[in-house]
Structure formats: C-alpha cells, structure tokens
Amino acid sequence: MVYGIIQLINFAHGDVFTVGSFIGLAAFTYVLTPLHISHPIWVALPLVLIISMAATGALGVTLERVAYRPLRYAPRLAPLITALGASIFLENAIFLWYPGGKNPQPFPRLFPSGGFNVAGARVDYLWLFMLVISIVLMAGLAAFVRRTRLGKAMRATAADKDAALLMGIDINQTIMLTFLIGSVLAAAGGVLNGMYTGRIFFFDGFEAGLKAFTAAVLGGIGNIGGAVLGGFVIGVVESLAAGYIPQGGEWRDVIVFLILVFILIFRPTGLLGERVGE
Amino acid sequence: MSAIRERLGRASPATRATGAVVGPAVVFGVVLGGIAIDQPVAFGGYVIAVALAVVVLGRMGVIAGLRDLTRGPLGRAVSLILILAFPFTQLTNPLWIRVAGLGAIFAALALGLNIVVGRAGLLDLGYAAFFGIGAFTGAMFSDCARCPMQHHLPWVLALLISGLFGAVFGVLLGTPVLRLRGDYLAIVTLGFGEIVRIALNNLDDVPILHTNLTNGPNGLFGVGHPKIGPVDLGSPINVFGTEVPNVLKYYFVALILMFVIVFVVRRMDSSRIGRAWTAIREDEQAAQAMGINTTRAKLLAFATGAFFGGIAGNIFVHFQTGTSPDDFSFIVSVTVLAMVVLGGMGNATGVAIGAVLLIALPEKLRFVSDYRFLLFGAVLMVMMRFRPEGLVPEQRRRRELTGQET
C-alpha cells in the first residue's frame, strides 16, 4: 500500500514487519510475563498486538519523517538508497541489540493448539484465527481507502501529489498516515507470523519482503487479487520444485527468480495486471 | 565561492605550485598518522579530530581552494607519486600492505559500480554477483591445483574471460529488466545477487550433468598467483634489504585497473554515450523524447559495470588465493554501494576515497566491528539526507541532487 501512494519500493517494510514481531515478543517476555498477565490469551494476545502495533506504528512514522520526507522532491535514486539504508539499519539493530538477536528466537504460541477436521483436512484454530484477522484487516483497509475522507486524500495523493496539494490536501499528513497504517499492519503480520512459525529471526523480514515483491510483480503491481494469486503460484511452484525436480530443494529460489524474469520479459504487467509497467 | 578560495585562485604561480604539493602531502600525512596510532580509542579520537578539522576548513573554503590547485598537472603528479609510494611506507607493517591491496581492489570494484549507479543512475543491488562470477571464472581459468575444473590460461586472457562472463550475465539480466522502471531493477538485481550466491553454493553438483564446478560452500582454494611475462605476482620482493610480501604487487595491479576504468569512463563520458547517460539520469522521458535509445544506453552502462566487476573479481581471487560463495553475499553489494554513495556518486576520486575509507576504517576500529553493517546502513541514510552528492562531489551531480537548476 505504501508503494502505491508514494511510488517507492520501501525496502524497509519487510524489516518493519520483523521489528513488529520482535516488539511483540519483547512485550510478552518483558512486560506481560513479569506482570503475570501472560494468561489467559484473550488478555495477552490483544495486549501483545496493541503494544507491537503502537510501537511499530511510531517507528514507521519516525522513519518517514527522518528518511523519506526530506527527500520527497529528490531524484528517485535518493529515497531508494535511504530505504535500503533503513532496512540494513533495522536488521542490524535487532541483530545487535535484541537480547539473543543473533540467533532465531522462539515465539510463544499464545493460542490454544488443536483444531477440527473438515472433510478429512485438519483445520488448526490458530490458522483459522489468522485467516479471520487477515480478512478483517484487509476488508477494513479497503473500506478505509474507499469510503473515508482520509482514504480519498490518500488516493488523490497517489494519483497526483501536486494536484492533491492544490486541492487543499495536506500531503505530508496523508503520507505519514499511510506509513502509520502500513507499519501497524506490518506489526500485526509480524506477530501473527511469529505465532504461526514459532520462531523469529532478524533476517526474516528481508526474505519475506523479497518474496512478497515477487508475488506482487507476478500477479500485477497494484492489483490485490493479482498479489494473492502471485503468492499462491509462488508457493505452489516452490513446493513442486522441491518435490519433483532432482535437487529442486536447493534450487527453488533460483526457479522462482527465473519465473520472475520470464514474467518481466513476456508480460511485464503480471498475470492479472492491466496497467502497463513504465 | 569563499574569499580564501578566491584568493588561492589568484595567487602567484609559486604559491600555487606549493599548494599543489602541500595539499596531497597533508592528506598523505594524515593517513600515515592514522595508521601509526595503534590504540583503538586514541584512533577514534583522531578520526573525530580529523573530521572536525575537515568540516571547519571546508566551511572556510581552504579545502575547495587546495582542491582547485591540486587539479593541475603538478598536483596530479604529486598525488600519483604519493599513492604509488604508500605501500613503501608500511614495509614493517605487512598487514597494511594487505589492506592497501584490498582497498585498491574494492576501489576498482566501486568504480565499476559507479558506472551503473553514478553515471547512468541505475540502482544495482546485486553487484557482488558480477564480482563473484569474475572470481570463480578467474579461479577456474588459472593455475588452481585444488579446483575441480581447471583450464590454465595466460592471465591476461583469463582476466578478459572473467570480464566477459560478467558482461554476458549483465546483459542477460539487464535485457528484461532495464525496459522497466528503476525500482524493478533494484529488486531484481538484489534477487540476482542472491541467486548467483545460491548457484555457486550448489554448483558442486550441476543438475543433469552431475559434475562439480565450484566445490559448493567450501569454495575454491589454492588458486596460484599469476605471472605476466617475467613478473611473478607470487614471489615476495626485496626493497632495500627488506622482504616485502607479494601482495604489494596486487596493489599496483588493482591501481592499474582503477586507472583503466577511469580512463574508459572519461572517454565514454565525453562521447555520445556519456551524454546519453547523463540525460537518462536527469530525466529519462525527456531523454527518450530526444531520440536516445534508453534501453541500449542503460544496457551498455550495465554491461560495462559488470565487465569491470568481473575483472576485479578475478584479481580478488588471486589476491586471496581462493574464495567461497559467502564472499559475495548481499552485504558485499551493500558495502560497495555505500562506498559509491559515501565518496560521491559519479566522481572517480570520491568513489576511490569512499572505498578506501570503508575498507581501512573497520580494520582500525575493530572494537566496533559488530556495528559495521549498522553503520553502513546509517551511512546510506545520513549521506542521502545531508550530503547526497557525497564527500567529494562532482559539480554537475551536485546541482542535480540538491535540486538546483543546471
């Protein structure tokens, strides 16, 4: 979403996601556990989510103020480089300053294990919960962007910054808000992902960001349905490659990358994309 | 333009000549002084003091004035002599001859990346891939006893092969991506860098063929030192009775590469191609409207950069007498980019200085070595924010990046 508004790949977004998961973990370990409110989950989980989302949102806004706003009218290369710098900085900050950050950290599950069977397939409660939360957040985001005044301001800013400014929109505030929402969502994603995989690592976000971008390009930039399809295709291709091609496991990233390159050659707009890539 | 700079500009020939000698000599002295300080904390203080002095003198216009004077033939000659003489001041200190060699190799590498980032304005985040391709082909086409595949060729030929391999991969990668906007290039090159590393890691069992090309994660070691005619880069040399390790020769080889790159880039710059690059950097759509084949011009920049990256890789593998895929991870690409950004995009002198700083400072400041990459990230952010034109700016680029009309 941030990409859509400011037309800039935010390299640091994946790392904001990681920071979100680490803040969530810190909130659980250093705040909730000493205060003896790490149980039951309907107290702990919302608290962890709220703390992480608040702190990460603040981080996103700071990042925007410090690193991006001063460069809004600079050539494209400049904000790309700062974004990269921010990404490296955040990764290494976790690596150096989070206790034990040099190794993957176990993440509490915070959710009852177990599940139920539907037509022979096992459905985990946690999995269901993640699905529900994701759908709620996505629907909320879509409604916000489509229906509210601020959402309208965002769309106007995305379409044409200068014209939006002339229309009396405070674009600084709008872009800051975009970063805030983007970071808050990233924090939620980070915490959920931590609960799902059970371990978090300072390098997670970087890989996640790269895969997410590949998925977005595959599906067509700026197309939410396309991004979902792209993510799905990549997941399937990876598993199939690992299973059916000899030594496919080692080469699966290479295969995904080759798919990306071929898509860029033959269909730069992605599978479902309509807008022509510039 | 400050008063001091103007006065220096109008000074008598004798004063100007003195300035041209004194300027480089002072820099040289500062560097030697820094190396001589062994204690890390004292060295940290020294760095801060020097940085403060540079800022103050810079504000007063002294540095700009001296730089103007150093531009003449005399200043250049003095600088060149001091650069050539540097390793001989460290005869008792082989570590620093090694650091100088490594610094020169990375300076050449950064100059190669500078063609892509600084001249054509394309952000390449996988430059280490070309470095790695050059290094591995370099090992394979050299006298490498423990390499699984070995075709011993004369070194100059092997150098060209490394460069060509880099350029071919550069074109293969660039063709699909360069038609798109810069952001795609950044991400795809980043992906490419990782892919090359993964491929080098796994090519110990090439799919289908089942041959071993790279020894996988173990890397290729035992790469011999090359010989050019009578010169054997492997043997130590004797200077005034002191035995100097052979790495000294690599320092000079890397310097030659640097000069070749600078020469080639200068020639390209003052041609149609260079003007096309500048136009693309400043406004791609306008450039296209002026009839420039932007894809071709960008591809040429990309291939040229990749070519020199490959050659630098070849020299590197001989210098280290071996390499492993981990030498070419993403963080290496970021390091080289930080060198370019720190020194000043587009400016050869600046880029070389940036490279030397980023190689030499961590060597001295070992007590903060864990923080190195954190600092690189901060360098990228701070430089873009406060001095996007780099420590040693190029005039045209400076106007461009600070938004002044050209």
Image (tube, coloured by chain):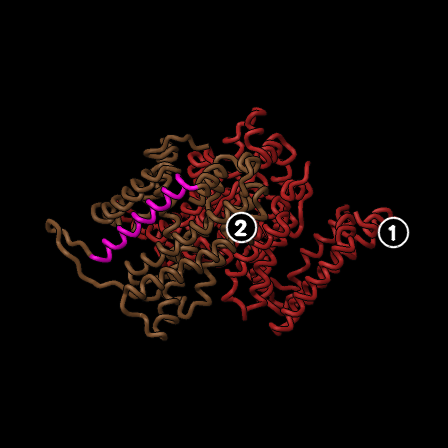
Callout 1 environment at 10 Å: few (<14), some (14 to 19), or many (20+)? few
Q: Nearer the viewer, residue B246 or B75?
A: B75
Under circle 1, the secondary element is helix
Residue A37's place in the image compared with A60, above or below, is: below
Callout 2 environment at 10 Å: few (<14), some (14 to 19), or many (20+)? many
Residue B105: x and y in percent read 56, 53
Residue A177: x and y in percent read 48, 48
Amino acid type at circle 2 is Thr
Q: Which residue is mark 2?
A: A82
Residue A17: x and y in percent read 40, 55
Q: Chain of mark 1?
A: B
Q: Chain of mark 2?
A: A
The C terminus of chain B sits in image quarter: top right
Q: Nearer the viewer, residue B249 or B121?
A: B121
User: Is residue A149 shown left or right of residue A234?
Assistant: right
* Display colour for chain A: brown
Q: Which residue is mark 1?
A: B14
Q: Quadrant of residue A266?
A: top left
User: Does the image show residue A61?
Assistant: yes
Foreground mark, 1 or 2, reads 2
Residue A267's place in the image compared with B335, above or below, is: above
Task: Confirm whether the magenta stretch covers residue A128.
Answer: yes
* Display colour for chain B: red
Amino acid type at circle 1 is Ala
Residue bounds of the magenta highlight: A125-148
